[in-house]
Each structure stands twice: as C-alpha cells, then as structure tokens.
Image: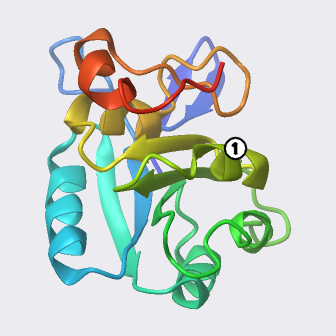
Amino acid sequence: MSHLIVNSEVRPGLSPGDGKGRRHMDPTRVLLVEDAGSVLHALGMLIDLLPGCKLVGTAATVAEAIDAVARLHPDVVLMNAELAGALAAVATLRAASQPPKGARAKALRIVLISVYGRGERDAQASGADAYLLKDCGPRALHAALRGKGSTGLRRSIPLPPACLPPCTERRPRWD
C-alpha cells in the first residue's frame, strides 16, 4: 500500500502522484460473485474498466465467496442477489472480512445486483449496502462500488442523475 506524508502525517492509500499535481488513490478492490459465465465475464471486464476499481477475484457460489472474502480481503462484494443463500450470507461475508489481528479494519461493502427488480426489500432487510438492476449502466455501478454520494446512511447510495430514469422506473427507491 502506498502512503503520502502530509504535514508529518502518514495517510495510507494516497500516492504522491505523477509529478503533475495529481494524486492516485488505491483502487477499490472488488470481488464478483456470479453464477452465469457470460455475465461474470462481462461484469468483470466492466469493473476493470471503471476508474478506481479493480477486480481481485470471482466466485460462482456463496460458499466460494465467503472463502474468497477471507482470502482476498476485498473492499466490495458485488453479488448476484438471485444466488441461493445470497441474502442470508450478507452477515457471514462481513464476518469473514475481518482482517488479521493487528491489521486495520475496513468495512466491507456489499452490493447486490439483480436482473429482476422484486428483491429490493429483502436485500435491504439483509443489510446489503446497495441493490442495483443489472441493466442500470456503468455510472450507477461505479457509484455503488466506490460508495460515492452516500448520505451516511447504509443502503442509500443515490444513483447518478443520468441513470435515474432507466434504473428506477420499475422499482421504488430505498429512501
């Protein structure tokens, strides 16, 4: 991990930049959990193309995801909400993400993604941080993965304005 020293304070996650006044943040590490191979491939490529995001692993089942979270320590888990046991596994994934003793703890964000818009209330009750439709587009996915725009309340990551009509017209918002 890179560090930047500012006023004698070490700030993890920042690098001095490229000499042109720009600083680089460590990328958001994403674990993708999806059982459909074509969707896994497409979302994996999209995640790697999103600025500030890096795909660190994939899993096809919830059990594989729990193992991968303990091994890879991702910042975000992007998981298909229709996987068997996905909603029940949210708390288990958070427990598996606990860092080794002495390491700094970082909260794991869990973003559920679905092709159907009917599971939003169940996803909210499970403790997931965000629920997106698979067709919502890269802007909304990027906002959810990076946790941008959060009002401080869990599960209230607003969608970017350009994505609001196609992403929300079929389902209610979580406000």
Of 174 and 53, the residue lying toward us: 174
Q: Is residue 2 left or right of residue 140?
A: right
Residue positioned 49% across, 86% down in the render: 61
Measured as percent of width and height from the top left, residue 52 is found at: 30, 38
Measured as percent of width and height from the top left, residue 48 is found at: 20, 54
**Rendering colour mode:** rainbow
Q: What is the secondary structure assignment of the residue under circle 1?
A: helix
Q: Quadrant of residue 24?
A: top left
Vertical comparison of 126 with 11: above or below: below
Residue positioned 14% across, 47% down in the render: 49
Q: Quadrant of residue 98?
A: bottom right
Q: Is residue 42 left or right of residue 67?
A: left
Image quarter in which the C terminus is found: top right
Of 133 and 106, the residue lying toward us: 133
Measured as percent of width and height from the top left, residue 60 is found at: 40, 85
Vertical comparison of 63 with 49: above or below: below
Vertical comparison of 79 with 3: above or below: below
Query: What is the crowding at mark 1: few (fewer than 14 residues within 10 Å), some, or many (at least 20)?
Result: some
Q: Amino acid at mark 1?
A: Gln
Q: Quadrant of residue 152?
A: top right
Measured as percent of width and height from the top left, residue 115 is found at: 34, 56
Residue tagged 1: 124
Residue positioned 57% across, 82% down in the render: 84
Q: Residue furthest right?
A: 101
Of 73 and 143, the residue lying toward us: 143
Residue positioned 27% across, 27% down in the render: 17
Of 101 and 94, the residue lying toward us: 94
